């Protein structure tokens, strides 16, 4: 039976991925297709299919019924493939420059076929190789402003927004975040993973009642505040880039949540480079500033020109929202810094540092900065204070 008509799920091999690409007629006549599984994320299979005749390629992404990073003992819903495809379509219509084009989706096979981005590199990998991607923060600021405004109650009508809230109910993937970002790193959970040299710092964190109070407040916001459609996993492993282009991929964690969450994940993952990349530290601090400045400018513009809610068009209410997003983003960034250092699913920015004392020092800074951002987010009122706080830890 043609793969296109299949009524049950089967996980793909390089051969079946190629069969699907052929059945979809995505290539010219008699293509000579090659296929390679290139997925290096935590959850999915990713096939890169190329017509060797002309170099044209597509990506086929397939969700596995379990979390690849742990194995079959951690079952995971295939529905995430539909969430991801739907989110790519919505984000693509709002911020087309920054989202890959979707060619085909199949909910039974949990498959999305999309634009080949293999001319770009995953930003985290590029950073570790020494790239700095000068336009990345401008692009991310614009992506954030457009996606967070146009999916809010103010960019959509409240009734359309409520339909989207329903469409993006994503309990299993949200539970991963609730556990791995907001819960497990703050007690002696089995999922945690850290080296012996960090134990004292980690135990201090587990004993810090004030920190745990603030993490509870942030977790409550994540659980309850349906402000905007979030990407939900916007770290630098979810971004393809080169010196002129930026594409945001992998929104399988998408759901309606607090706007500061996506901004905070971008902050935290740039902060890892601020911490580890002494040579380019000033450039990554500039990236942090640019993300927020561009986001604030463009969100303000959209608020003033595209707002569906007349009463909301007040500068005081706009500034109330921006201040809330900023405060939340600092807190969420703090949680991301801590979880990527001692929880499940680390970042190569830290783990690839070969020299042990240098690596441990970077990880301690990440934990310290994370704790400060969580506890002092209300006092860190603006970008200048944020950067001052970061520099105080370096
Ligand atoms: C079991 S999933 C672990 C992590 O991988 C994803 O990319 C998310 O960041 C998640 O927290
Ligand atoms: Mg991902």
Image (spheres, rainbow, N blue to C red):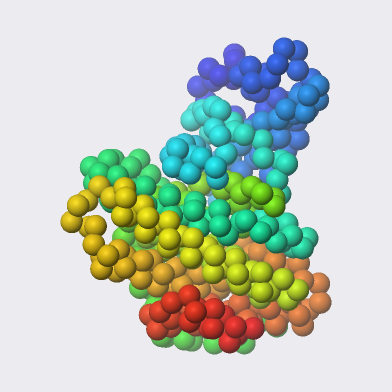
How many numbered circles are shown?
0
- Compared to residue 308, the image places residue 378 above or below, namely below
Q: Nearer the viewer, residue 72 or 315?
A: 315
Image-based side of 391 in relation to 161, left or right: right
| Corner quadrant of residue 218 | bottom left
Residue 341 makes an appearance in the image: no
Instruction: Tell me the quadrant of the picture where the N terminus can be found.
Output: top right
Q: Position of residue 328 (x, y in %)?
A: 40, 69
What residue lies at 62% left-to-right and 34% top-to-bottom? Answer: 115
Residue 85 makes an appearance in the image: yes
- Compared to residue 176, the image places residue 80 above or below, namely above
Q: Position of residue 241 (x, y in %)?
A: 66, 50
What residue lies at 66% left-to-right and 69% top-to-bottom? Answer: 283
Q: Position of residue 244 (x, y in %)?
A: 66, 49
Image-based side of 182 in relation to 320, left or right: right
- Compared to residue 229, the image places residue 332 above or below, namely below
Instruction: Tell me the quadrant of the picture where the C terminus can be found.
Output: bottom right
What residue lies at 75% left-to-right and 17% top-to-bottom? Answer: 31
| Corner quadrant of residue 119 | top right
Image-based side of 293 in relation to 198, left or right: left
What residue lies at 46% left-to-right and 86% top-to-bottom? Answer: 208
Q: Nearer the viewer, residue 179 or 74?
A: 179
């Amino acid at each position: 039976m043609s793969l296109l008509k299949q009524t049950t799920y089967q996980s793909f091999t390089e051969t079946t991925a190629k069969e699907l690409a052929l059945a979809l007629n995505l290539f010219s006549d008699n293509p000579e297709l090659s296929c390679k599984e290139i997925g290096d994320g935590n959850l999915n299979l990713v096939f890169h299919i190329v017509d060797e005749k002309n170099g044209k390629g597509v990506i086929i992404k397939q969700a596995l019924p379990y979390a690849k990073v742990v194995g079959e003992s951690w079952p995971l819903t295939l529905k995430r493939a539909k969430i991801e495809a739907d989110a790519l379509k919505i984000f693509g219509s709002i911020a087309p420059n920054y989202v890959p084009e979707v060619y085909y989706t199949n909910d039974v096979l949990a498959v999305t076929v999309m634009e080949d981005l293999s001319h770009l590199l995953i930003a985290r990998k590029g950073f570790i190789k020494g790239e700095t991607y000068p336009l990345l923060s401008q692009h991310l600021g614009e992506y954030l402003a457009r996606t967070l405004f146009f999916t809010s109650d103010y960019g959509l009508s409240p009734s359309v927004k409520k339909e989207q809230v329903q469409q993006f109910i994503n309990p299993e993937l949200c539970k991963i975040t609730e556990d791995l970002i907001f819960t497990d790193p703050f007690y002696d959970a089995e999922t945690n993973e850290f080296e012996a040299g960090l134990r004292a710092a980690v135990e201090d964190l587990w004993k810090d009642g004030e920190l745990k109070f603030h993490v509870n407040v942030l977790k409550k916001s994540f659980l309850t505040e349906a402000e905007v459609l979030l990407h939900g996993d916007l770290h630098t492993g979810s971004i393809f880039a080169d010196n002129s282009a930026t594409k945001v991929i992998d929104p399988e964690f998408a759901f309606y949540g607090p706007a500061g969450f996506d901004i905070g994940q971008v902050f935290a993952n740039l902060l890892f480079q601020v911490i580890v990349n002494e040579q380019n530290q000033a450039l990554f601090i500039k990236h942090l500033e640019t993300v927020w400045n561009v986001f604030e400018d463009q969100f303000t513009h959209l608020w003033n020109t595209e707002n569906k809610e007349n009463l909301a068009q007040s500068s005081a209410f706009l500034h109330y929202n921006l201040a809330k997003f900023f405060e939340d983003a600092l807190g969420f960034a703090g949680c991301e810094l801590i979880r990527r250092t001692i929880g499940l699913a680390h970042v190569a920015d830290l783990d690839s540092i070969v020299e042990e004392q240098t690596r441990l020092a970077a990880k301690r800074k990440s934990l310290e900065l994370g704790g400060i951002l969580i506890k002092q987010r209300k006092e860190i009122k603006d970008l200048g204070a944020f950067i001052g706080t970061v520099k105080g830890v370096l």
